[in-house]
Structure formats: structure tokens, C-alpha cells
Image (tube, helix red, strand yellow):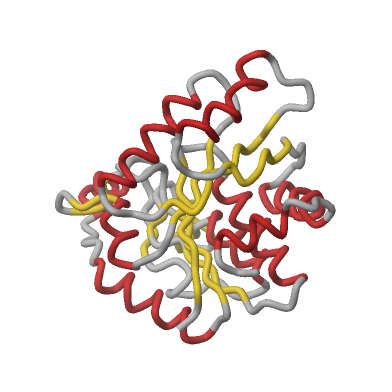
Amino acid sequence: MAEGIFITGTDTGVGKTVVSTALALLLRQRGCRVGVMKPVTSGCIERDGRLVSEDAETLAAGAGIAVSDEVAPYLLREPVAPSVAAEKEGVRIEFSRILAAYHRLADSYDFVIVEGAGGLMVPLTGGLLIADLVKLLSLPLLVVARPDLGTVNHTLLTCFAARHLDLEVRGIVVNGYPEHPGLAEATAPHMIDSLSGAPLLGRFPFIDAPTPLGAAQGLATWLSNQGSTRILLREIGCE
């Protein structure tokens, strides 16, 4: 079965999809067959009479594969917590279905990137959280954090929760790092690196692009020119 990584965030909107897609692009450039998965997407759009996960489409484009039931098992319309959206829409989220989809991907690809929804404590169904899904999939974590004020607290809380739940954090990346950081942005990465108990694997720059896929392509190009990228890939298990 393939190796894999579960990409979580310290919050919603921190750029998990951009980071996940950039890693998929980077691995493809290195000849790796990459599978991607967005187990549950809330806030889907409707296109041609069916729900579509734009996050899953971006991930699949980065991996060079088609969106399928394995890539996006659960599609929910409402842009709220998955458990709330699922209840409102009469959908029962079953972990067994997600696990089976992941196993099919892992049997078909060299490496699988799974992107969560929000952070580890996001509820999915019946009192089960994203963290419970991570444990079921037996995947290590890469934590995506934002660069600005408050990120130290959010990142340390995420890492503390992961350790408390016996989840392995392979590393942290600070995403959307500004070209001209203020005092909060300039000091946060060092504090995260020294206090979180997990290595800081990168400060990813803010990429100004019209689409998430464009931002991911720009980030992948940037990463391909960084000497530290090999360390990043080694730590998440694909180098």
C-alpha cells in the first residue's frame, strides 16, 4: 500500500488546498504517481445539476487524475461544518466508505495526499471529528498554519491536540508568508518551531494568482527551486 500524508490546518482558509496541490504537482515532476483525496467537502457548488467540490477539482488537476468517488466521496452544499451540512441535507457520513475509498487510492498510486476540512476538531458525524478520521486512516499529519497574529496559539493547540490523540505530526508549514513581514509574522515561525514539538518545514510565500490551481502552480515552482524542499519531502515520507 502507498505511503501518504494527511494535510490539516490550524483553521479554515489557511491554504490547505493550495499546499496539497503544490505538493502533488511537485511529486509528479519527480515521477511519482500521486493520488489525492478530499474525503468531505462542504460548500460545494452546483454545476450542470450536480454538486462539485472545487477543492477536489484543484487537487485532481495537480495530481493529473480525474475527480472520482474515491477522490471526493462526500459532497455537501452548505458552507458550514460537515456534520451540520450532512444533517441538513440528509446525508450520513460513513467512515467505512471513506476508508474503502482511501484503500483503493493507496492500491493504485505511489503516494496519497489527503486534505482535511478545517482543522482537527472539525466535527464530521455522530461526535466523530477530523482527528478520528486521521486515526482511522493511520496517516501522519502535515499542519498548514497562517503567518499572522494568533498563529502561534492556533498552531500549538493543533499540535497539542494531535499528540494528545496519538497522531503523528511530521511537520508544520507556514503558508501565505508575506514578502515584507511585520513583527508578528517575523517572529511566529521561530516560536512555532521551538515550542510546537514538530519541525517547521517551510515558510511558503503568498502567491498572488486568480485561482487556487494557479497559486499551487506558482508555489510548486517556488518549492522546486528551494534546497530545503528535499527535507520537506523526506519528512512527509515521499523522498
Side of 120 where 113 appears, left or right: right
> Is residue 172 shown left or right of residue 78?
right
Q: What is the number of callouts on the image?
A: 0
Q: Which residue is drawn at 26% across and 50% down?
A: 165
Left or right? Give the position of 239 relative to 154: right
84 vs 156: above or below: below
Q: In which quarter of the image is residue 186?
A: top right
* Vertical relation: 27 (above or below) 223: below
Decide which of 223, 193 is in the foreground and name it.
193
Residue 54 position by quadrant: bottom right
**Quarter of the image where one finds residue 224:** bottom right
Q: In which quadrant of the rendered image does the C terminus lie? A: bottom right
Position in image of residue 141 (x %, y %): 45, 54
Spot occupied by residue 33 in the image (x, y as percentages of width and height): 64, 79
Q: Where 47 sits versus 64, above or below?
A: above
Residue placed furthest toward the left: 126
Query: Residue drawn at (67%, 38%), measured in percent from left and top?
Result: 203
Q: Which residue lies furthest to the right in this view?
A: 225
Residue 212 higher or lower than 51, as above or below: above
Q: Which residue is drawn at 52% across and 32% down?
A: 194
Residue depicted at 56% across the width and 32% down the height? 146
Nearer to me, 165 or 103: 165
Looking at the figure, which quarter contains the N terminus?
Answer: bottom left
Residue farthest top in this picture: 183
Q: Position of residue 193 (x, y in %)?
A: 55, 35
Instruction: Give the percent coordinates (x, y) of residue 74.
Output: 36, 63
